[in-house]
Image: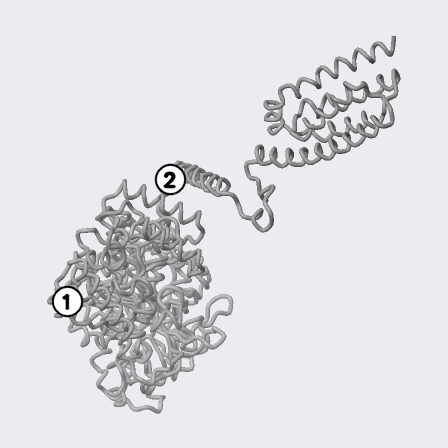
Amino acid sequence: MSDSRGSSRGSSDRSRRAKPSTNGGPRRAAGVRRASGAAPASKGSSRTARSGGASHSGTRSAVPGAKGAAAGSPKGTSRSTPKNASRGASTAGAAKRPSSRTSVKARHAGVAAAAAGAAGARRGRGKKAAATNFVNYPRAGAKSPWRWIPSLRLVVGAMALMVLAGLGLTMWLYSTTDVPEPSDFALAQTSRVYYADGETEMGRFSEVNRTEVPADEIPDTVKQAVVASEDSSFYENRGVSPRGIVRALINNVVGGSRQGGSTITMQYVERYYTGTETSYVGKAREAIMALKIDQELSKDEILSRYLNTIYFGRGAYGVQEASQAYFGKDASELDEAEAALLVAVIPSPSTYDPANDLEVATSRWDRVITRQVAEEQMTPAEADTLEFPETIEPSTENSLGGPEGYLLSEVRKELIAQGFTEEEINTGGLTIVSTISPSIQENTEQAIENLPEDRPESNRVGTVTLDPSTGAIRGMYGGPDYVTQSQNNATQARMQAGSIFKTFTLIAALEDGYPLDSRWDGNSPKSFPGGWEVNNYNDVSYGRVTLAKATTSSVNTAYAEANIEIGPQDTMDTAVALGLPEDTPGLTADASNVLGSASPTVTEMAEVYGTIAAGGVHHDAYIVESVTRPDGSTRYEHEGEESQVLDQDVATNATVALQGPPTEGSARSLQNVMGGRPVAGKTGTSERFRSAWFVGFTPQLVTAVGMFQPGEDGSEQSLTPFGGVTSMTGGSYPTDIWGDIMSTSLEGEEFRYFPQEVTLDNENRERSYTPPPAPDPTTQAPEPTEEPSEEPSEEPSEEPSEEPSEEPSEEPSEEPSEEPSEEPSEEVTSEPADDDNTQPTEEPTSEEQGNGQGAAGRGQGNGRGGGGDSEDGTA
């Protein structure tokens, strides 16, 4: 049964194998397309032949099978032939053995068929790879080196893929690229600070020197020149230039410098939004933004924005600043030649700046003119008439240099205090109007320049002039140059107040009910509880003096007594109420505070005295009047707050008393300087002449002047005399400076007078203590005679001690003169009185030397202690 099944299967196999041979044409064609089974077919035929058991029909079928293999028939050889041939051979071999001759022939036929099948299989495999592998690289069947050359199909296909990918990337970039907000740098504009007139520029704040101007203020000469030079197709292109991009790509591919093919719109995008881009993706985004912006903005808007942001060299961004930097004029005033030069420097400002290379700049300028002729913006004849324009020298000045640097610094500080940020100040394009009067500021600086040439380099002066009715600072001197000395002598430097602090005790006494004619012990020396000993300057004794006289002559002992009587706390509280900061160094409630141990700034003292000048109304000193945005809207406007901190009548009587020093006291030289204009104020000199002051006012202005001398380590040093003055007091150069500033600043202004003394409601005519008897005179000072009754003596004693004492002052004896009694020690000094004529003021130290013996005798006192104001004869 087994043989029967085998025979049956063999017959069936033979019949299936016979079919290809009867229809060899189509099968072979199919075999060409599918030839994977050729080799196994020949192998099967070979095994059949070798087995020797194949029938005649089996042998015949093997040969067609081999032929099918050679022809590459897949069905006849690959799958059916090996298996069926094997089975048929086995069955036939079991039935009948062929003759040896037949076997040999069959074997030879099998070998030939196998060889043909193998060759067909190889050819079939190669053709299938070419049919199914699109890339076919390296190329199958091709001989080297041709097999390494891509086929046309591969090249075309790759290019098609690249085009599709490029289109897809472009569509993706276009859909995902939005026009962003302009960069902060692009929007940055210079903020300008002006004097109070709103026209005179004081200085600028900037991170980038740019001022944006409207499109209608940019002349056509500039617009035409930049289009001709930078992008002649500007008005026709859509924001990008395909020709320029292709040119840039070719240059980049061949290894040239990286180019961007930029149009004016693309340059604008780069400067206004993206910054410099060098990558291809970055350039692609830049181009897409240019396309979008070209659709959103008009050509004129794009061009004007471009011209407002481009860098022209010399630190100038935008055509307006460039015009100022190169020609010192506004952009609206540029002519054709000047416009062409500005455009010529755009590609490389440092290279094409005439100040750096005139020949190169001229060549570049000529190129722009030639381009304008080519674009028919001007005729050749018009071009021939143009001459290379003259430019100004590049500015090397520091914006904060000189005395103005201190003003700008104070403006910045005040803006920050009002809520402005540094970024807004530096880049906001703000218009800042200060309170500084250009004329008063000029007068202030000139007053300092008028000081003698031998003034020590270490000598420093600070001044502030303000309007008492508002607190507006009209003038300030903080130093000669902010760049070399950043500390502001007017707002930051602190120095002992000296006798200018007596004004607070004066006001406290008036508030406590002590009138100006109340009397106090002015003898020297004088001891107080706690072992405190006070001396007057040069140890002069004045006897019983009124509060007004004690103010005029700056009598230390009388003011010390008054301070103890009313309470040092009242003096301190008064100073704070009038505007002195509570944390002022040295400000305490000690009895010695009356002599000026506190160390205020010049600005603080100007503000405090301004309160008195304003009738007791306090205004904070300020320097910024208004701030306007670039669009003209108001960003800030000063709204001063005022408060009545001092009774008006008290302020009036304090002003009456303070008219004494400029009239009869140490600052009386101002009478001539001011032309008889009413002045109130107080001089002050600190211990060991470490500082000298004069703070005074008229009804219109207040000015404070302070002079000091720091050591190398910053410590307070005694003022070094100069200009023929042997000792530096408040009645010397500080008074001279004050007079120079105020006399010139008030020139042409009406004379305004102070109110007359008034009677205070709380006046205490009966002192609560019995004045001690006057001691024997220790100097040439007058010896006041007290009446038996203290009450009657108040009025009468004042009259005889002042009126009569002035009459006999011409007599040989100086004692009867109350005025001379302040400085009888002048006779002790070695300097003669006639030296007075050579000094900077007529009587520069009358505060310390009542009969004006001159500067040669200044500072010769030998006072012993008495707080921060009396030692070494300070007042």
Residue 218: x percent and y percent? 19, 55
Name which quarter of the figure residue 346 lies in: bottom left
- Residue 707 visible in the current orientation: yes
Q: Is residue 750 left or right of residue 454?
A: left
Q: How many marks?
A: 2
In this rendering, the answer to whether 217 lies above or below 663 is: above
Q: Quadrant of the C terminus?
A: bottom left
In this rendering, the answer to whether 627 lies above or below 329 is: above
At 41% from the left edge and 76% from the top edge, which residue is drawn?
709
Kind of residue sitting beneath label 1: Ala
At 34% from the left edge and 56% from the top edge, which residue is drawn?
578
**Tag 2's secondary structure?**
loop
> Which of the two residues, 750 or 65, is positioned nearer the viewer here?
65
Q: CA distance from mark 2 to mark 1?
A: 43 Å
The residue identified by callout 1 is 383
Residue 163: x percent and y percent? 43, 40
At 57% from the left edge and 40% from the top edge, which residue is drawn?
136
Q: Which mark is residue 178?
A: 2
Kind of residue sitting beneath label 2: Asp
